[in-house]
Image (cartoon, rainbow, N blue to C red):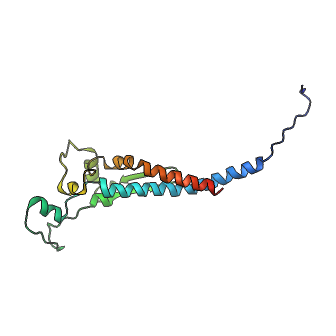
Amino acid sequence: MIGMNEDFAVTLVGLDEAFRILNSISSNSEKVMARTMYRIAALNRDAIRLKYTPRSPTIEDTKAGSGAGTISKTPSNHKRVHPGGLERAIEFASSAQEASIYVAANSEAGAYAFVIHELKGIKWHKRGLGTISKGPKADDDFIPRGIVDHATQSFAILSDAQTKALKAI
């Protein structure tokens, strides 16, 4: 039995190496996660723009849907449609801790984005010609639906990045 006044020593072998590894993981982790979150946000933003975001009809959509005559493609024609404003307005920001996908209120489609995203059944009811031509996924709540549908790909990016980071140690 060891008394209160006797010396007791514990030697830990490899503790310096463990601290070096932990320090290396910590310093590399922020860089890895910043790049990973950027990749995840970019993947989701691009998918949301491509498949999930409602769109105004193109000239071809308008002609096909209305049976109207030709619409001039000259820039001076005031009837010319410019679809894709909402798609172009979807942005993202990312850091090592988080990623956000959003439509800025001051963008070309800021006010429209809220109406389309949140007010289906209140301010609008039916999908338009342009949205129909994009496919069945283009509809309201386009940002969260796109993120949920791409969760598997996002997790794969995260898993791959962490595996590479651990192998680099």
Q: Position of residue 36 (x, y in %)?
A: 51, 55
On the image, which quarter does residue 28 sit in? bottom right
Q: Is 122 located above or below residue 130 in the figure?
A: above
Q: Position of residue 10 (x, y in %)?
A: 84, 38
On the image, which quarter does residue 11 sit in? top right
In the image, taking residue 26 as reference, residue 160 lies left or right, namely: left
Q: Position of residue 2 (x, y in %)?
A: 89, 27
In the image, taking residue 119 as reference, residue 99 lies left or right, namely: right
Foreground of the two, 10 or 159: 159
Q: In this view of the protein, can residue 96 be seen by the observer?
A: no
In the image, taking residue 77 as reference, residue 50 lies left or right, namely: right
Quadrant placement of the C terminus: bottom right
Q: Is 84 located above or below residue 11 in the figure?
A: below
Q: Is 124 located above or below residue 164 in the figure?
A: above
Q: In this view of the protein, can residue 75 be seen by the observer?
A: yes
Foreground of the two, 38 or 60: 60
Residue at image point 46% right, 57% down: 39
Q: Position of residue 134 (x, y in %)?
A: 25, 57
Quadrant placement of the N terminus: top right
